[in-house]
Image (spheres, rainbow, N blue to C red):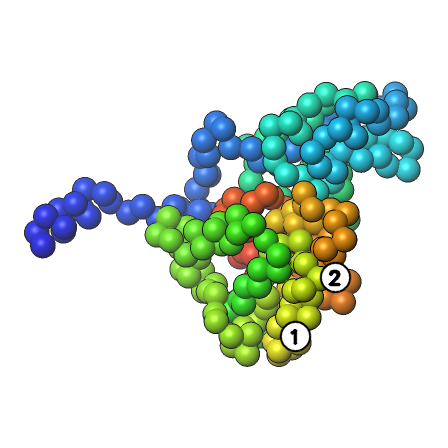
């Protein structure tokens, strides 16, 4: 027993000091993508269309823009295409309040804004969330589980996952939403009392991810469920999700 105490004392406090201190992430971390473009009017060419995702798309002038909601954060997406250059930054802050905010000509996004004062008063210092994996590879779920470990310790901010939607203030949706899961997802959403929050986590829940266009999925959260927070990633880093939640609650 004394050896256990000695070991714990030597380990110190492993919990991160986020958000009170800057976070240092490994060099291999692929954060918010950035786009450099020449604005010459060059249309998006074959290299962009050959990307493994819909990260690079055309705006109304046929100029390249980024859709962070479709990004798979794969090395193949950091590439050059006619009129543009895509790279990954070290910035984990990407969660937004609307789907359109994830579409950007540079990679810069307007981060999620705090709920209005009345909503924040209702939730107080406590937020309970029900997770629904609606056709996922389990990558996003693994990162959500990590939010409960000693490093990120989401519970210190009063945010916890619960087993029943009847006990929840909101729902966290992961996966491309398979047709077989749509009814279960909508029933879970309906079981949560108003006011309720909806958080779409991961490329699949936002746009269908790598399964976009498959007849077996809905390409993300259906329009019947309004989303309050969009968290891009494949899967999102725990800090990306936590940053979005704290911004939504007015803690940042």
Tell me the CA gap for discs 2 and 1. Answer: 13 Å
Please tell me whether residue 38 is drawn above or below residue 237 in the rendered image: above
Q: Is residue 66 above or below residue 122?
A: above
Of 78 and 125, the residue lying toward us: 78
| Kind of element beneath mark 2 | loop
In the rendered structure, the answer to whether residue 108 lies left or right of residue 83 reads: left
Q: Quadrant of residue 158?
A: bottom left
Q: Quadrant of the N terminus?
A: bottom left
Q: Earlier in the sequence, mark 2 or mark 1?
A: 1
Q: Nearer the viewer, residue 216 or 218?
A: 216
Residue 187: numbered disc: 1
Residue depicted at 61% across the width and 76% down the height: 192
Note whether 212 is above or below 76 in the view shown.
below
Picture residue at 60% right of the left edge, 44% below the top: 233
Left or right of 216? Residue 122 is left
User: Where does residue 157 sit, x and y in percent of width and height?
Assistant: 45, 60
Q: Which residue is mark 2?
A: 222
Let me know if residue 47 appears in the view: yes
Label 1 sits on a secondary structure element that is: helix
Residue 8, position as x, y percentages in the image: 19, 48
Q: Quadrant of residue 60?
A: top right
């Amino acid at each position: 027993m004394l050896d256990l105490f000695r070991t714990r004392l030597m380990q110190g406090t492993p919990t991160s000091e986020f958000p009170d201190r800057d976070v240092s992430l490994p060099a291999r971390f692929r954060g918010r993508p950035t786009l450099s473009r020449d604005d010459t009017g060059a249309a998006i060419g074959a290299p962009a269309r050959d990307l493994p995702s819909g990260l690079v798309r055309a705006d109304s002038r046929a100029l390249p823009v980024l859709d962070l909601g479709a990004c798979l954060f794969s090395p193949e997406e950091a590439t050059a295409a006619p009129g543009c250059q895509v790279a990954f930054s070290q910035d984990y802050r990407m969660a937004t309040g609307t789907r359109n905010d994830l579409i950007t000509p540079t990679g810069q996004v307007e981060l999620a804004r705090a709920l209005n004062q009345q909503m924040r008063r209702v939730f107080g210092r406590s937020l309970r969330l029900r997770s629904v994996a609606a056709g996922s590879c389990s990558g996003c779920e693994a990162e959500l589980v990590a939010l409960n470990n000693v490093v990120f310790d989401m519970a210190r901010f009063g945010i916890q996952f619960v087993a029943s939607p009847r006990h929840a203030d909101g729902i966290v949706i992961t996966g491309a939403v398979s047709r077989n899961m749509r009814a279960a997802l909508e029933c879970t959403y309906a079981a949560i009392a108003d006011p309720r929050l909806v958080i779409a986590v991961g490329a699949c829940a936002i746009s269908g991810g790598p399964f976009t266009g498959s007849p077996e999925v809905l390409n993300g959260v259906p329009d019947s469920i309004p989303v309050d927070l969009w968290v891009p990633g494949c899967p999102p880093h725990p800090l990306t999700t936590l940053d979005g939640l704290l911004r939504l609650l007015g803690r940042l």
